[in-house]
Image (cartoon, helix red, strand yellow):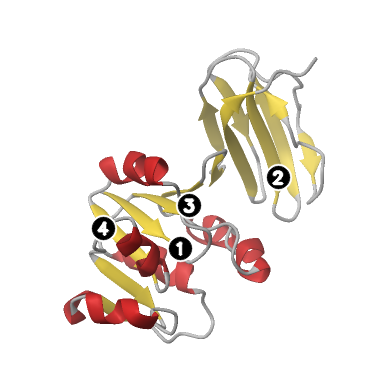
């Protein structure tokens, strides 16, 4: 089962929302993400979080769809993803996770690290789909599709094939190495022996000179 989670950052475009919503069994809002859902003409199946960012949107949402979770040790996005997994979802797309408060936008990819081995969790915007590499990932797309690898901490044994610049049993730390590669042959592959490696799959083609 697939879910679409709307976070409380910059909302997705109507076109991206329609694309992601078409394949989702559930629409879940992370607290204030409910305001974005309503603005896009959609009623969330559930609104999860501490519910302090709903504002006037609370009056438009049926009370039985509100799922309050006051846990101070988790963000509303983490609560929403955890709720989806508990509901039986094995694929979760997150939109609206960028922009907004810088601290939240910087911390939001932590949900990929926390839950990316329990379900396929992606953060999607107009430019990228981002997910955790759980041992190995296959990356399909036309030649020139942008691919970036970002280590959330230290990663060991990073190996790629099918990218323009390959890695062989490399160690990556949080930083610029691994950013802005591209598909040379599809499908490309990325594997990691240990550590939390984030794969940014570009939604556009930009070939290097």
Tell whether 81 sits left or right of 137. left
Q: Position of residue 152 (x, y in %)?
A: 69, 54
N-terminal label among 3 and 4: 4
Q: Residue at x 30, y 46 (%)?
A: 21
Q: Position of residue 162 (x, y in %)?
A: 64, 17
Q: Nearer the viewer, mark 3 or mark 4?
A: 4
- Residue 42 numbered tag: 4
Q: Position of residue 149 (x, y in %)?
A: 69, 39
N-terminal label among 3 and 2: 3
Q: Nearer the viewer, mark 1 or mark 3?
A: 1
Q: Are marks 3 and 2 in contact (CB under 8 Å)?
A: no
Looking at the rendered structure, the secondary structure element under dot 3 is loop
Front position in the image: 184 or 58: 58
- Residue 7 numbered tag: 1
Q: Residue at x 61, y 31 (%)?
A: 190
Q: Position of residue 176 (x, y in %)?
A: 82, 43
- Residue 150 numbered tag: 2
Looking at the rendered structure, the secondary structure element under dot 2 is strand
N-terminal label among 2 and 4: 4
Front position in the image: 85 or 122: 122
Local crowd size for mark 2, using a 10 Å CA cut-off: few (<14), some (14–19), many (≥20):
many
Q: Nearer the viewer, mark 3 or mark 2?
A: 2
In which image quadrant can residue 79 be found?
A: bottom left
Check disc 3 and report the residue beneath it.
117
Q: Is residue 115 visible?
A: yes
Looking at the rendered structure, the secondary structure element under dot 4 is loop
N-terminal label among 1 and 4: 1
């Amino acid at each position: 089962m697939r879910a679409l989670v709307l976070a409380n950052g910059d909302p997705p475009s109507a076109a991206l929302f329609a694309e992601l919503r078409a394949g989702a069994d559930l629409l879940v809002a992370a607290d204030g993400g409910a305001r974005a859902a309503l603005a896009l003409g959609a009623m969330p199946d559930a609104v999860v979080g501490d519910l302090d960012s709903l504002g006037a949107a609370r009056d438009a949402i049926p009370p039985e769809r509100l799922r309050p979770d006051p846990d101070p040790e988790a963000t509303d996005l983490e609560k929403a993803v955890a709720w989806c997994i508990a509901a039986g979802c094995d694929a979760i797309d997150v939109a609206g996770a960028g922009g907004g408060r810088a601290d939240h936008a910087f911390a939001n990819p932590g949900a990929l690290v926390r839950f990316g081995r329990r379900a396929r969790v992606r953060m999607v915007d107009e430019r990228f789909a981002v997910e955790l590499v759980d041992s190995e990932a296959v990356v399909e797309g036309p030649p020139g599709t942008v691919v970036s690898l970002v280590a959330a901490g230290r990663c060991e044994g990073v190996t790629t094939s099918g990218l323009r610049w390959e890695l062989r049993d490399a160690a990556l730390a949080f930083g610029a190495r691994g950013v802005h590669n591209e598909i040379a042959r599809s499908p490309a592959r990325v594997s990691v022996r240990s550590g939390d490696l984030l794969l940014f799959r570009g939604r556009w083609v930009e070939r290097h000179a």
